[in-house]
Image (cartoon, rainbow, N blue to C red):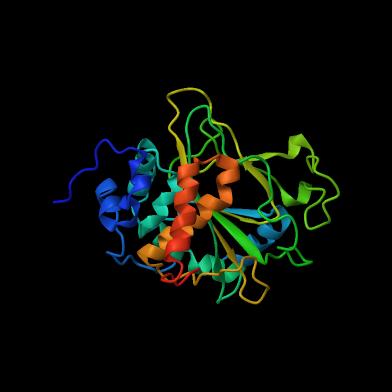
Amino acid sequence: MLRKVENLNEDYLSNDSLLTKEFWVNLNPYLNIENIVYDNQSIISYKNFVQDQNHLVKLGYLHKKNSNFKVPISLMKKSIANLVNYKLPPVFAFVYDEFWYIQFQLRMLLEKFLDKNYKQLPDFWAWHVSSGQSGWGPHRDKVEGSLFKNSLPKSLTVWIPLSKASPDNSCMYILPANKDNFYNKPKLNKNFPGALSDIRALPAEAGDVLMWTQELYHWGSSSGEDSLNEPRISIAFEFQRSDVAPFNTLLLEPNLLPTFNDRLALISMQILQYTHMYGFKKDLVYWAQSYIEKYKKELSLV
């Protein structure tokens, strides 16, 4: 029987604990690492694709409810809360199989809106927004170049709440594309690109799917300082068409499960990419840099 991880502190950064599957399985024993095969069948089928496509082109986003993922959403939520309790960034959740299989099950959705050979970008994240905290501020995932002239997407972001996401505990807010003065146009200034009255809240339930173009102006709101609010826990992925220039130097095959070592490399990349937003401690940044440098000859990703 695997022992329970107790009294974990930041000493894990000074030894090889993070490099072992045992460490992560002990931390969240109800999830898997290279240990299970989930149903990869797409959970979203289409009868009204044209309607959804028109919605995406006009407003810049889609909200698919009751997606019925064939992965344990509640346990995935629990695992992120556990990581935070042990002072580990939520992005380490991507060490587990379930956090990769969940996007495998969106294949039909992404094939429809991108193409059958679409690629996954090595850009992903996980959030745990507690009372009094905020999601990311207003931004575009890509400022320009991610849309065709007709506003069809070259790339997309998929955001999945693992908990309820509401205005009380932080949900996504957007400025609809048709209300955005600079959507698919040159960005003339950094002012808010529309009217405040056009802002739209997108509350969602655990397991819903929000998908938006990468020029959509959006942000995660603050969570109220009411201790009764449950944390808003969510994850996001980015994808692109296969027939356009890569938006990153590394592209992933979206239905291939990365190896354990490759997952640690990808997670390290995210830590380095977003440390300017979170102010991660130097020890963690050094660990991520050292991991990539030490193992890059063995990794298939770097």
Q: Is residue 7 left or right of residue 128?
A: left
Quadrant for residue 278, please give it.
top right
Picture quadrant where residue 67 is located: bottom left
In this picture, residue 281 sits left or right of residue 172: left
Relative height, residue 162 to residue 260 (above, below): above
Q: Residue at x 64, y 70 (%)?
A: 246
Callout count: 0
Q: Position of residue 131 (x, y in %)?
A: 49, 28
Q: Residue at x 30, y 67 (%)?
A: 37
Which x, y percent locates residue 293? 47, 62
Q: Residue furthest left?
A: 1
From the top left corner, tell me how far across and down residue 188 is, in percent: 86, 49
Q: Is residue 150 visible?
A: yes
Q: Residue furthest top?
A: 226
In which quarter of the view is residue 48 placed?
A: bottom right
Q: Residue lying furthest right in this view? A: 188
Q: Where's residue 242, x and y in %?
A: 61, 75
Q: Is residue 139 left or right of residue 70?
A: right
Observer-nearest residue: 47 or 99? Answer: 99
Q: Residue at x 42, y 61 (%)?
A: 263
Residue 46 visible at all: no
Q: Where is 50 relative to 271, above or below?
A: below
Q: Closest to the observer: 10 or 35? A: 10
